[in-house]
Amino acid sequence: MNNKTFLIGNWKMNHGIAATTEYCQQLAELSTGLKKTELKIAPPFLSIASATSVAKESQLQIGVQNVHWAENGAYTGEISCGMALEAGATFALIGHSERRQYFGENDHDVLRRTRAAMETDLLPVVCIGETLEEREAGKTDTVLRTQLEGLFTYLSSDEAPSKPLILAYEPVWAIGTGKVPTLEDITDTHRGIIEYWKSFNSTAPCPPILYGGSVSPDNFGEISKIEEVAGALVGGASLVYEKFSKLAEIAEG
Ligand code: 13P
């Protein structure tokens, strides 16, 4: 793993304002003792403001789970990058498989959201991953390359601001199922993404790639040792302090 480890909790549709405030106090305290781990959480939109106010004096960073590409307008149910920044968010999850699966987001939307985030100061965390069916058909690499093509074209063009971006490889079949790819599979897939990046840009390093999908204190020790894994995007285990703090301890090494 790199010098800096990203540990990002995606709370999905869990934890309202009261629960967020209480839990963030613990996480804010935890974050102040961390030396090499960037601890971040993405609560539901309604809880962002309380999370950022609790996290203000700490190292804990707060992000949103989605962001629209327009600055404002008639987009019911969406929020803009400017609104997220105003509420104190520093990053945005983009293209999570649940957004793709249940809300019909496609690679073009993901690219538009990513561009909007990069054009402001939100760090995009762009999620990619194959379904079980695609994996069983031997299409994992093709699927990931299709998801990444527009993004990598943009990032390696003059249009893209030179700002950081994070990728998260989350096999859809591993999310919330307790099933995790083998360490070899994770290594190969991350290497494949890096190789693909090199075909677009042979000089700049590939953005950091997180692994996500049933990450737990039981498996993160081994996963975090993989050199090509820059950290984890965590769902279920990020909802409970005992588990998430254990992951932070592992990330610290
Ligand atoms: P789980 O860790 O619950 O499998 O969720 C992963 C995920 O979707 C994080 O974005």
Image (cartoon, grey):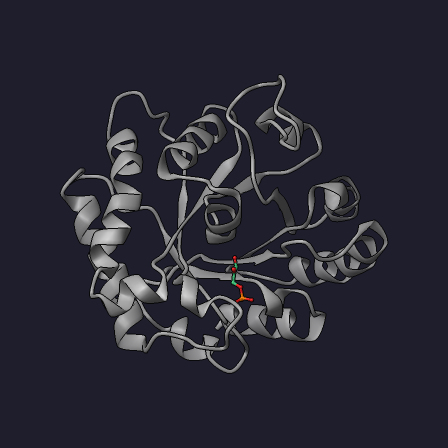
Residue found at x 51% / y 46%: 99
Residue 88 position in % (x across, y down): 68, 35
Q: Position of residue 129 (x, y in %)?
A: 36, 56
3, 22: nearer the viewer: 22
Q: Is residue 56 visible?
A: no
Reply above or below: 253 against 210. below
Residue at 54% of width from left, 29% of height from top? 68
In this rendering, position of residue 36 left or right of residue 203: right
In this rendering, is residue 225 above or below 73?
below
Taking the spot 79% from the left edge, 52% from the top edge, the residue there is 16
Q: Quadrant of residue 203?
A: top left
- Which image quarter holds the N terminus? bottom left
As drawn, 6 above or below 249: above
Question: In the visual, does 238 lie left or right of 19?
Answer: left
Q: Is residue 225 left or right of residue 41?
A: left
The residue closer to the viewer here, 88 or 115, is 115
45 relative position to 151: left or right: right
Q: Which residue is found at the position 27% from the left and 72% from the top? A: 185
Give how far across and how far down residue 202 sits, in percent: 14, 41
Q: Quadrant of residue 228?
A: bottom left
Total number of numbered discs in the rendering: 0
Query: Does residue 87 appear in this view?
Result: yes
x and y percent of residue 224 in the render?
Answer: 41, 71
Q: Residue furthest right?
A: 18
Of the pair 154 and 122, the residue shown nearer to us: 154
